Amino acid sequence: MHPNVIVVGGSSGSLEALARLFKDLPADLRAALFVVVHTAPDSPAMFAKMIGAYTRLPTQYARDGQRISRGTVSIAPAQHHMLLERHAVKLSSGPKENRFRPAIDPLFRTAAVFHGQRVIAILLSGYLDDGVSGLLDVQACGGTTVVQSPEDAMVDAMPRNALKHMKPHHVAKASSMGALLEELVEKRTESSRKYPPERLLLETATTGALGADPAVMDRLGSRSDITCPDCGGALWEIQQGSLVRYRCHIGHAYTSESLAIQQKQVIDQTLEIARAGGKPCAGRGRPITEHQCL
């Protein structure tokens, strides 16, 4: 079995890394590539064109239901998670994870469950730790993990957090990743199949959906005393090795770091509204007329 699904995640500083990674990829690469970069909701649809300028591979924004095709690059569009199924791509406007939509973890998680050993997951430059959980999922399912060397990253937090919580198969500079990927794609994997753990199957089933049964959430983790800063609902604590994560039944998900930042942001918004004499909505800290929970 040869790896033939490559998933890439990045945030601040990752465009430069992507340019160095893609420029050396051959036009006949026998793998499908999927890229998530944190983008603002109103981001102009230029990213696919920018990436396309650095590679000989056809590059496009992903479309819901498109077939997984080797030798192509698909970019997650703004305001949509990009999820992988067995043969096709699914786009979801479901709840944010780690404060972003698109987020890296949903792509890595679904790739791990449906493609197992065929997956190569790459985490590039960025703040905080989105993508770390997904890398752990890929390893749990027998896939290969690659992390940009922190010294090579423009923003080193995401690579450093990955190295804090796991031991990836490869740590490399972005400029050497193209050659590494070509080698990995051509290398046959001989390891035995690894079945996804129950937690991963349950979480994948709820990824992108709007709402999960609390009984299912109880199987994912333990109920915490913390409420979701996005919707005000209960949060379940999920232990993934040394990584602590939180998820509500609506589907908002956070690492402990992203949760702390979102909580502070909501408090700051609430204080601003109070000073302005506004009327905050429950659990969100925004005026009722601006309430967009997802």
Image: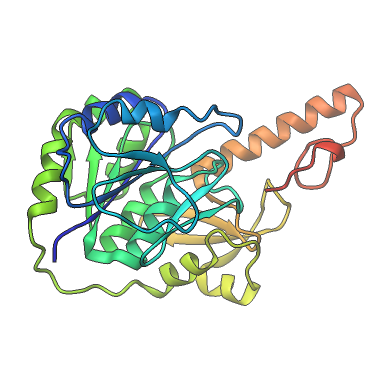
Observer able to see residue 142: no
Q: Quadrant of residue 108?
A: bottom left
57 over 166 or under it: above or below:
above
Q: Position of residue 40 (x, y in %)?
A: 56, 31
Between residues 236 and 4, which one lies in front from this camera angle? Answer: 4
Q: Position of residue 264 (x, y in %)?
A: 65, 34
Question: Residue at 27% across / 43% down in the picture?
Answer: 163
Question: Residue at 12% across / 50% down in the picture?
Answer: 184
Between residues 268 and 6, which one lies in front from this camera angle? Answer: 6
110 over 93 or under it: above or below:
below
Residue 222 in the figure: left or right of residue 126: right
| Colouring scheme applied when the structure was drawn | rainbow
Between residues 30 and 149, which one lies in front from this camera angle? Answer: 30
Question: Residue at 26% across / 30% down in the picture?
Answer: 150
* Number of disc labels: 0
Q: Position of residue 55 (x, y in %)?
A: 24, 31
Observer able to see residue 236: yes
Residue 289 in the figure: left or right of residue 284: right
Q: Position of residue 192 (x, y in %)?
A: 15, 74
Between residues 207 and 35, which one lies in front from this camera angle? Answer: 35
Q: Quadrant of residue 237?
A: bottom right
Question: Residue at 51% across / 49% down in the picture?
Answer: 81
Figure quadrant of the N terminus: bottom left
